[in-house]
Image (tube, grey):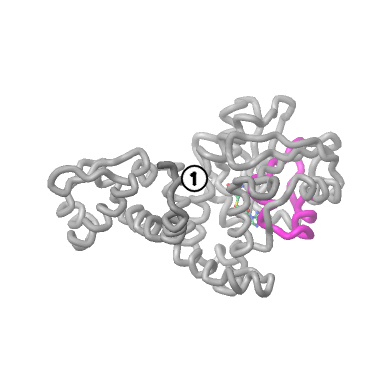
Amino acid sequence: MTPDELPVSVQFLQLITAKWVVKPMYVAAKLKLADHIKSGVTDVASLAEKTGTKADMLYRLLRALSSVGIFHEGEGQNFTLTPLAECLLDEPGSPRDMLLFVNDPVHDRAWDHLHYCLETGNVGFEKAHGAGIFDYCKTDLDFSEVFNRAMSSNGQAVHSATASVLDISSVDTLYDIGGGHGHLIKFLMDKAPSLKGGVFDLPHVVAGAEDAKYPELKIMAGSFFEDIPKGADAHILSFIIHDWDDESAVKILQNCYQALPAGGHLFICDAIINEPNAPNLGKLLDIEMIVMTTGKERTVDEFKTLIEASGFAFEGIVDTPGPHSVICGRK
Ligand SMILES: C[S@@+](CC[C@H](N)C(=O)[O-])C[C@H]1O[C@@H](n2cnc3c(N)ncnc32)[C@H](O)[C@@H]1O
C-alpha cells in the first residue's frame, strides 16, 4: 500500500504525529547514538551508560526509531545503523546539523508564535526572543554555532546542487555574499580551481570561514546593508534574499550593484514558488520564513521585479537538482 492509498484518517494521523518521530531523532542526535553504535557500542545497557540515560527509556526511544527505519533492532536489544541513521552521525556536512537547528529550543520557541504571526504579520522569532535572528545570534553564540553549522550542512543537498549547474566559466572573481562559513564558495573553488573566491558575512560569522585548505579564500566582514566590498566580477547570494522583505532585499541587491563592475554577474540561489498545489519544499520553507524572518519565498516574477528594481537586467533561471534554482542577473 503506498502512502496515498492509506485511509485518510491514517494519513492524517501520520502527519500530525510527525513530532513523535522528529523529537526522538533530535534526542538521538544530541546523544550521538549513531556515533556510539558505529564505534561498536550496540547494546542498550552500554549505550545508556555512554549517554547518561536510563536503559529502559533509551530502549523505548531506539525501538520507536527502529519502527520507522532509523536504526535496526537485532537480538538482545542490540542496534545497528540504517542509511537513515547514518544521517545522524556527527560528521562535517552531516544533515544532523539541520536536525539540531530546526529542533533547537530557541527555534521551537519562535514556532510557538506562528498563530501570532498570522494575526499580526510580525515575526515569531522577534516575539519569542526580543530580536531578529541575526542580531540574536550575536549574543547567543551557542545558537549561532548551531545555526551556522546547519547552513554549512546544506552542503550535499544544496550547495553541491548549485555547483553542479552554475556556469562560472567566464567569472574571474566570485564573492559569496552572506556566505556564512564559506561552504558554497569552497564547493565552487573546488569545481573551478582558477576561480578567485571571497566570502562576506557578519564579523562573528565569517570568522568561522577560515580554512587552511583554502588559503586563497578572501574573508571579508561587514553588513550587506552598509557596504559590500568591490573586487569581484560576480556575486552569489545563497538563501539570503528569502530572509528579507522586498525593501530590504532591494537594498542588498543595490549594494551588490554598486560593488560590481559593468557586465558583472548576479546569482541568487533560492527556492521558487511554482503553481498552486504542486509539491515544493519552498512552500514549507516559506512558513519557516514567516516565523523566523521578515522574508518570504518568491515566484519568478517577484524575483524579476526585485532584480530590475535594483538596477540589474534579469537574465533567467537555472534549475538545480536541489530544492532551489539560480536566478541570474547582469549589471
Ligand atoms: C540563511 S543563511 C545563508 C548562509 C549561506 N549563504 C548558505 O547558503 O548556507 C543567511 C546568512 O546571512 C548572513 N547575514 C545576515 N545578515 C547579514 C548582514 N547584514 N550582512 C552580511 N551577512 C548577513 C547570516 O550571518 C547568514 O550567514
For label 1, the SS is helix
Image quarter hosting the N terminus: top left
Q: Is residue 168 left or right of residue 88?
A: right
**Magenta region includes residue 110:** no
Q: Is residue 150 left or right of residue 38?
A: right
Q: Which residue is mark 1?
A: 153
Q: Is residue 224 left or right of residue 1?
A: right
- Can residue 216 be seen by looking at this rendering? no
Image quarter hosting the C terminus: top right
Query: Residue visible at 69% across and 45% down?
Result: 274
The magenta span reads: 227-253
Residue 55, image x, y percentages: 18, 59
Quarter assignment of residue 10? bottom left
Residue 4, image x, y percentages: 48, 46
213 over 42 or under it: above or below? above
Neighbor class of circle 1 (other Cα within 10 Å; few <14, some 14-19, many 20+) is many
Query: Residue visible at 61% across and 32% down?
Result: 163
Query: Residue visible at 71% across and 43% down?
Result: 268
